[in-house]
Amino acid sequence: MQVSVENSGGLERRVTVLIPEADIQEKVDARLQELSKQVKIKGFRPGRVPMSVVRQRYGKQVRMEIAQEAMQSSLQQAIQDEKLRPASMPQVAKMPEDINKGDIEFTAVVEVYPEFDTLDLSALEVEKPDASVSDQDVDEMLNTLREQRRSWDAVEREAKEGDQILFEYVAQTEEGRVPEQGHQRLAIILGSSGFESLEAALTGMKSDSETQAELQFPENFSEQALAGKSAKVDLKVTKVSESSLPEVDEEFISSFGIKDATVETLRTEIRANLERELKQAVTSLLKMRIIEALVASMPGLEVPDSLVRQEAASMASRAASQEGREAEPEESAAFMGKAGDRVRGGLLMGEIARQNQIRIDGGKVREAIDTIAQTYEDPAEVVQLYYGNQQLLAQVENAALEQQVVDWVVENAKVSAKEMKFQEVISEAAGANR
C-alpha cells in the first residue's frame, strides 16, 4: 500500500491510497477458495466445484466486495500510520477508474483536529463568582413557594393589579373575524401578562361587564391569527378573582415532606437546596468564563467546519424545540458564529485535559451522582439507575471531567474573586446555558 497526504488548506487533508493489484488478487483468491467449499452448483458435488466455475460465477462480485473492504481498511490504516486525527467521517473524493482490474487508487478528504502547542495558562485571567445564600434569598424562595400555592377567589369589585381576569373576546382584523365563530376565552393576571394595552382595557372592569378596545397584539400572542396584528376587540369579563397566599403553618410545611413541620427545618431545607443550586451555577458560570478567556487568547484557532455545522444545527434545533417546533435547515446559519466559539472552547478544554493527563476521577463521578440523588426521595435507587445506564453515566463522567479541567485551570491561571449576589449568579448562569 502506498500513501500520500496533501495539505489542501486549513484542516483539510487529501489522502491518496494505492492498493497493489497483487494484494487485491490474493484476497480475492482466498475468498473464492472458501466459497468453493460452500457453494452448491447443479452438476457438481458440494465442495468439489472447480475454481474456474466459481471464479466465473462469483469472481466479479467477490472482487467488488474485496475492493470495498480493502479501500475502507487501507484508509483507516493510512490515517493511523500518518497520525491524522479525523474530526469527522472521511469522504472519498476520487474513486478508482476501474475497480475490477489493476491497482486500486483513490483519494479521500479528511478533516482533522487542529494541532496545539503546549498550552501555558499562567497568564490567563479569569473572574470566579463569589456568592453565598443569604437570609433574604431564603425569604424570597419561601415567598415563591407560597406564590406557587396561592388560591384564587372570585370577587365582585372592579379589577385591579394582581387580580386574575377570565374573559371572552372577539377580534376584527383586516383579514376578518377571529375566531370565525363564537368567542375565545383567556385568563391573565393584571400586571404580569406583558400585554399592557389589554391590561389597561381590563383594569377597572367587573364580572359580566363589556368593553371595546383597539389593541396591537404582541408577536408571541397565543392566537397565531392575531400575533403581531392590530385589531378592534370586543371584551367581556366573566370572572374577577383575587389571590390569597397560604400561611406558613404546619399543613403548608408538611406538604413538602418535612416531618417535624417546623419553620426552622423548612428554612434549613430551602437553604440547602439554594446552596446546591448556587454551587452548580458558580461551576457553570466559571466554566463559561474560562472558555471565553481561552477562546479570546487564541483568536486565530481554526476548528473543523463539520463540527461547527453540527453544533450550529444542534443549537438551532434546541431553539426551535423551545418554541414547540422543528428547526428549518437554513436556521442553523444564524448560530454559526456562536457555534464556532463553542467548538473552540470544547477543543481547548479537551486539549488541556490531554496535555496534563487529566483523566476521569471515579470519586468525583460518584460525588456528582450522589449530589443528583440527594434531590430525590430514594437516593439509593437513583444511584443504582445512573450506574446501570451507560448513557446517563457517560453524561456524568463528561461533566466530571469538565469540572476537573476547570479545577486545574483555577489552580494554574490568574483567578480573581468577583463578589456577586445569589440571584445574579443564577441569572447569569441560566443565560450562559441557552
Image (cartoon, rainbow, N blue to C red):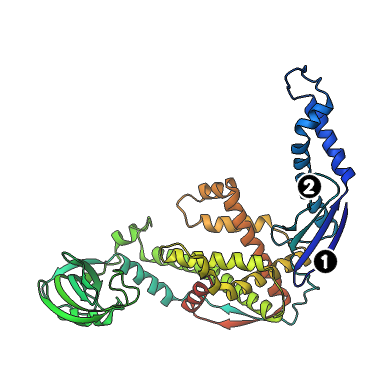
Q: Is residue 95 above or below residue 172?
A: above
Of residue 257 and residue 163, the one placed in the foreground of this image is 163
Residue 203 in sight: no
Q: Amino acid at mark 2?
A: Ile
Marks 2 and 1, the one that precedes in the sequence: 1
| Residue with the mark numbered 2 | 99
* Location of residue 215 in the rendering, given as x and y in whole percent from the top left corner: 23, 81
Within-10-Å neighbours for mark 1: few <14, some 14–19, many 20+: few
Give the vertical position of 173 relative to 397 (above or below): below
149 lies above or below 229: above
Name the residue located 50 percent from the left edge and 64 percent from the top edge.
317
Residue 20: mark in rendering: none
| Viewer-nearest residue: 342 or 124 | 342
Q: Position of residue 53 (x, y in %)?
A: 80, 27
Separation of residues labelled 2 and 1 (CA atoms): 23 Å
Instruction: State which mark lies toward you, 2 or 1.
Output: 2
Q: Secondary structure at mark 2?
A: loop
* SS category of the residue bearing label 1: strand
**Which residue sits at x=46%, y=68%?**
271
> Label 1, on which residue?
6
Q: Position of residue 45 (x, y in %)?
A: 77, 16
Q: Are marks 2 and 1 in contact (CB under 8 Å)?
A: no
Q: Quadrant of residue 39?
A: top right
Q: Amino acid at mark 1?
A: Glu
Side of 5 where 402 appears, left or right: left
